[in-house]
Amino acid sequence: MLPESLCDRIGVVLISPRNPLNIGAAARAMANFGFRRLTVVTPYAPTWREARSAVGAPELLQEAKSTESLAEAVAKCTLVVGTGCLTYRKPEQPVVQLPDLATRVAEELARGGRIALVFGPEKHGLTRDDLSYCHIMVEIPTDSRQPSMNLGQAVAVCLYELATRVDSHPFHKERITAGPSAALRSAQDDRTAGTSGSLELLALLIEEAMLAAGYSPKGMQSANRHDVRLLLRRLSPNAKDLRRILGLFRRILWRIKRASASSTHPD
Amino acid sequence: MLPESLCDRIGVVLISPRNPLNIGAAARAMANFGFRRLTVVTPYAPTWREARSAVGAPELLQEAKSTESLAEAVAKCTLVVGTGCLTYRKPEQPVVQLPDLATRVAEELARGGRIALVFGPEKHGLTRDDLSYCHIMVEIPTDSRQPSMNLGQAVAVCLYELATRVDSHPFHKERITAGPSAALRSAQDDRTAGTSGSLELLALLIEEAMLAAGYSPKGMQSANRHDVRLLLRRLSPNAKDLRRILGLFRRILWRIKRASASSTHPD
């Protein structure tokens, strides 16, 4: 089992689950394996009410957050892991097999990061837009004749894997369980990946710069947004890099705006 | 994923499940991880009907067997693995943590054995009598504050572990996937554990011999039966041993009966 301090840096995000039983089952699996941070994105109100009022619902369900968007749900995370059946789609980010996920998660914990495991709705899984917030995709190795898992069972299998295998990597063990000291924190900025929220801030700034600079036609805006999101997650700049790049784009934007202001209103 | 020939030597046994959704969930997890042999012991008729007629029920549910007893369900198995939450009970057989089960299962497959994973009813799990048919107990490492798992999720987690980790033990790999040749089969009898059915046959014979020999008062019969069952599973005699011991007890019984016959009807 993972120590509590680590479990609390790994959250589960359910996007618009349809069946209250599945929310209950996901929460129960979390309680079974010692995880507590559950976020539900745009739940259907009756489903959400029913799940939370169910007899024997785990305590963490009462403390679960609900958000209006996936961006908001994962804003503080440095590694966003999409889950789902990859039989019918080819994801644009790296795919990790579930039995290999613990290594990646242990590394992220070792550098002080926060992780979100994201599960899509029962029917169709994560959308292309949801996926643009994911650094990696995890695949549960299943039989090609029946690849798609039940939501509650998929959550249970993923959390079992992390609970039993993350801490067993001796290479990371000491670094993981020791929290960052104050002296180390600044140096750690070099190693800590930027949060999903700060990547999103940068993406918006880049988008604004693209528009201001007349980089491409307006019709490309949505496709560009998608590509920039994925690009930033692939590059995974650290916290210090991010501050620098944000500063650069703020400056660029200011410059472009001043230039166009002076060209339309010459002083 | 495990090759089909191995999956078919690992069965799932559900004892009197109450909720048809749980039967469906167990069957779906089996299909997800490539397992096909499901046996349900003394199912409640309406539950069983409802589970099998559910929309989208995996094919293996149609082929599932139902039996009147656990003894019958596991008769052909050489390793019977009980599952359940051990927080409130101290089992009488060895306990294996789920992350270590693959090694034990790979060994059993390597010597040609058949394995059953046994899950008790939702409410109370396996009874003491059920447990007397189990060679080992497997424990899913869970949080002590919420140790008990949902049935469908427990099945999923156990099968995921076996599907992803049994075949990755290179030491056994070759021996496992190569089926036993005819020439080897006799020598293999030395390595193959007796089936649960043949152990049960021996247990009955021993019980008969105990009674015939006036070994202990009639009131002890049920306790003795329980102890003998567990003893035989702990000893785990191989197929050749078993034939020899069965022969010995048959002879003993015959001898006692003849002796008592001659003492009551002297010729």
Image (cartoon, coloured by chain):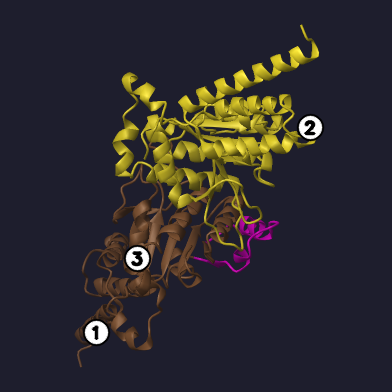
Chain colours: A brown, B yellow
Q: Residue at x 63, y 52 (%)?
A: B90
Quadrant occupied by the N terminus of chain B: top left
Q: Residue at x 65, y 39 (%)?
A: B227
Q: Is residue A106 left or right of residue B217?
A: left
For the residues marked 3 and 1, what is the alpha-carbon distance in whole angstroms?
45 Å
Identify the amino acid type marked 1: Arg
Looking at the image, residue B97 lies above or below residue B202: below
User: Is A53 included in the stretch rendered in magenta?
Assistant: yes
Q: Are marks 2 and 1 in contact (CB under 8 Å)?
A: no
Q: Which mark is residue B159?
A: none
Q: Quadrant of residue A198?
A: bottom left
Q: Quadrant of residue B57?
A: top right
Q: Earlier in the sequence, mark 3 or mark 1?
A: 3
Whether callout 3 and callout 2 share a subunit is answered no
Q: State which region is magenta.
A: A41-68
Q: Which residue is mark 2?
A: B218
Looking at the image, residue B106 lies above or below residue A61: above
Q: Position of residue A251 (x, y in %)?
A: 24, 84
Between A218 and A6, the residue placed more toward the observer is: A6
Identify the amino acid type marked 2: Lys
The residue sitting at the top extreme is B267
Q: Which residue is mark 3?
A: A170
Q: Which residue is mark 1?
A: A251
Q: Position of residue B15 (x, y in %)?
A: 64, 37
